[in-house]
Image (cartoon, rainbow, N blue to C red):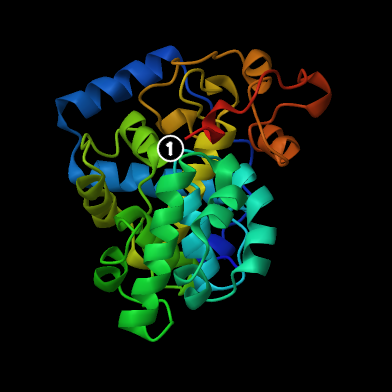
Amino acid sequence: MTTASRSTSARGAAEPAPAPRATARSAARLAKRIAAGEPALGRARRVGRMLRTLAATHPDAHCELDFTTPLELAVATVLSAQSTDKMVNSVTPALFRRYRSALDYAQADRAELEEMIHSTGFFRNKAGSLIGLGAAVVEKHDGELPRTLEELVALPGIGRKTANVILGNAFDVPGITVDTHFGRLVRRWGWTEEEDPVKVEHAIGALVPKRDWTMVSHYVIFHGRRVCHARKPACGACSLSADCPTFGAGPTDPIAASALLKGPSRAHLLEIVGIPDDDAPAPVGREDADAP
């Protein structure tokens, strides 16, 4: 599996003491300050603190789609629309063995391809996109996936979000991936009020050094899937709570919140906020943040 290289700043981040915890009063003060118009310098400093904390909280952050070539990542990302990474990763091993090149997708038997990707949902539209993608890469790029945003978004099935995933993780070209989790969290954290994904991308790009754009995407998406869930965030077990204006949207009791933490790094997530693993109840329910 190929992933983007972590930035020097992320690699060099030291493991901090347990993250400071917010209170209802401190969160209300922060929310009031943001609503009144947070000064640019203050926001930049707050975002910087949160990024350092995210790097320490999710040192394993990476693209969770399995791939070995840029074309494989493009295909996996097309399949991930309205699906989960786990589901896509269950389909792609056989798919990648069957279709190894852009020409293979261009010449694919549609019925066979639809059958192979059926479980990812919207399989007819996705099959059409993959066949069209293969044909366009063969006809316009001699069978090699292009390396620029402009060329990628001109391909069938490749939008700006998908293009940034490919650029950042296959070609090591910095890009901010604004998916559902990313947009939801940066608005929840008061980094931007923008709703349009392109405007969100530009707003966060202005706050974060370009070299860190790809890793910022991974950190935020990891946090959304593991801690800051859409319906019930684990506020009391969140390492970012001291800088979050919406602290209290989920349970603030550390032990109750710890039951909401998800993913294989749960023990580390508990450690980073100073909750003994022995005291934490087992997680309950499914990881709602892994849903599209």
Q: Position of residue 169 (x, y in %)?
A: 49, 66
Q: Is residue 25 left or right of residue 197?
A: right
From the viewer's side, name the closer residue of 279 and 202. Answer: 202
The image quarter in which residue 226 lies: top right
Q: Check disc 1 and report the residue beneath it.
A: 181
The image quarter in which residue 263 lies: top right
**Rendered view: 75 above or below 41:** below
Q: Position of residue 82 (x, y in %)?
A: 46, 38
From the viewer's side, name the closer residue of 258 and 239. Answer: 258
- Asked whether residue 274 is in view, the answer is yes
The residue drawn where x is 51% and y is 66% is: 108
What is the number of callouts on the image?
Answer: 1
The residue drawn where x is 57% and y is 43% is: 118
Q: Position of residue 125 (x, y in %)?
A: 40, 47
- The quadrant the N terminus occupies is bottom right
The residue drawn where x is 51% and y is 27% is: 229
Q: SS for tag 1?
A: helix
Hey, which residue is sitting farthest right in the picture? 278
- Asked whether residue 20 is in view, the answer is no
The residue drawn where x is 19% and y is 24% is: 35
Could you tell me the amino acid type at mark 1? His
